Image: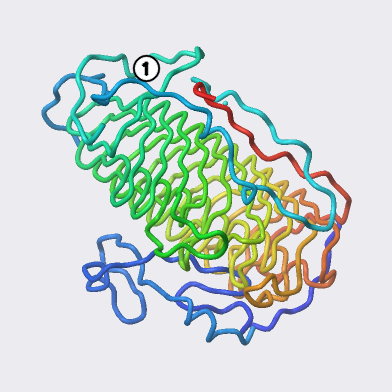
Amino acid sequence: MNVKHSLAVPLAACLGLGGGIGCASDDEGSADAATDAKADATGAETDTPVDPPARDASDATAFDTAGTGDSAGTGDTTLPADGPARDASDAALSDSAGAGDRDGPASSDGVTVDASGSTDASAGDGVGASDADAVTDAPCTLANSGPVVVNRNGQVVENLRITATATAAITVDGYANVVIRNVTISHTGGPGISFSDADDLRVENVSIVHTGAPASGANDSDDRNNIDGYASARPQISNVRLTRGSAGIYLVSCPGSQLRNVEGHDFRGPFPRGQLAQWNNSNDGLLDGFSVVNPAGSWPEDNVNIYQSTNVTVRNGHIDGNNSPSGVGVIFDGGNSTGLVEDVDAIHMGNGCFSAYDGADGSIFRRTRCRDNICTSQGRGVPLSGALMWCGREGLSSLRIEASTYFSACAPNNTVWPEDSFALIELAQADFVPRAPLALTFCWE
């Protein structure tokens, strides 16, 4: 075992506003007036899980010292009234989705994954029938559509090119077993996909771009999430490309989620959003096979945030870029969060790579790798932790760092803190080539 001794980072550098900035970034959710009424002034939750109290950018700046129901038939398919249309414009991402110019070795070329059926108009009710489990690798043609509102259990929304400018592109509210597949979405003024009370939702082979983002910097609101879910058990989201949303996937009270093959680019917040994925009061989640690339003009907070959620697994991931002075690569946050981070690389991080600062005891960081972190300001302030790589918390004792690696640390004596919060530290300094980001392709591309 090669244990790298770290500086004792001042506690003030790791404390935060209701959840921690510095060693542990925060990412509590934004709350509306009804939600605020359910939380006390300290942010304590009531018995019903709700979105935690919002904190605005001024807070972070000030802290710079450191169902079921009647069904019209499973498999009913939503089709727009207008005829099919197809173009190639969706295939290209803007230059801002790239990794940007940075020192240090670049990861290898992106892993190309054929998302056409791979597992590893206006609002209308649709007509016709489709088998919700039928999947094909054949090329597909997309029909132009306005926003879609699902209105039955088991409805299938597929083969659409949806544009939404003032509301969610797809809304699922109160219907179970809905399938959304082979869809590309351009959205502004609201989320891309919004679902609530929608158990066993499936989203697969979908590309979502928030088109209202500025050329660089934060979005105009923290609710421009590409996918926004609430109070829905067992959502399955796979083979999705998410771009420039406030967050990519934000799940509140959605236990048993499975997120697979998630490709993310250029998330824009504003605070407290900015994640590729976040669980909020959503136990037993899985993120398996993912990448997130944030260029210089992005506005992330944490890249992956597990907030007040237990038994969450994050594995097989590539994280490149975080310019937030308080955000980290993957964090267990909100007091009781636990889980496993396995086979994840984090590069070009400012405030931290992996953290359990505001989580509970027992989380494991296995075969995690961190390199080329950044000690200086990237335009938003210097890292509040002094560019710490792995963070625990005073009072914890059974966190674990297993078979993990770091290289090219900008602060070589600030790799792990506090060491006594970890029951095991297996950490070696060694050069490595980061795993490649995802590069999904879809049947319409």
Q: Position of residue 312 (x, y in %)?
A: 50, 48
Q: Label 1 belongs to which residue?
A: 133
Q: Position of residue 394 (x, y in %)?
A: 61, 75
Q: Position of residue 113 (x, y in %)?
A: 62, 27
Q: Can residue 309 be spotted in the picture?
A: yes
- Residue drawn at the location 31% of the way across and 32% of the way down: 145
Q: Amino acid at mark 1?
A: Asp
Residue furthest right in the image = 430
- Whether 296 is drawn above or below 176: the answer is below
- Residue drawn at the location 81% of the way across and 56% of the way down: 406
User: Which secondary structure, mark 1?
Assistant: loop
- Residue drawn at the location 41% of the way across and 49% of the way down: 283
Quadrant including the N terminus: bottom right
Q: Nearer the viewer, residue 402 or 163?
A: 163
- Residue drawn at the location 29% of the way across and 30% of the way down: 178
Q: Residues within 10 Å of mark 1 (few under 14, many from 20)?
A: few
Quadrant including the C terminus: top right
Q: Can residue 119 be spotted in the picture?
A: no
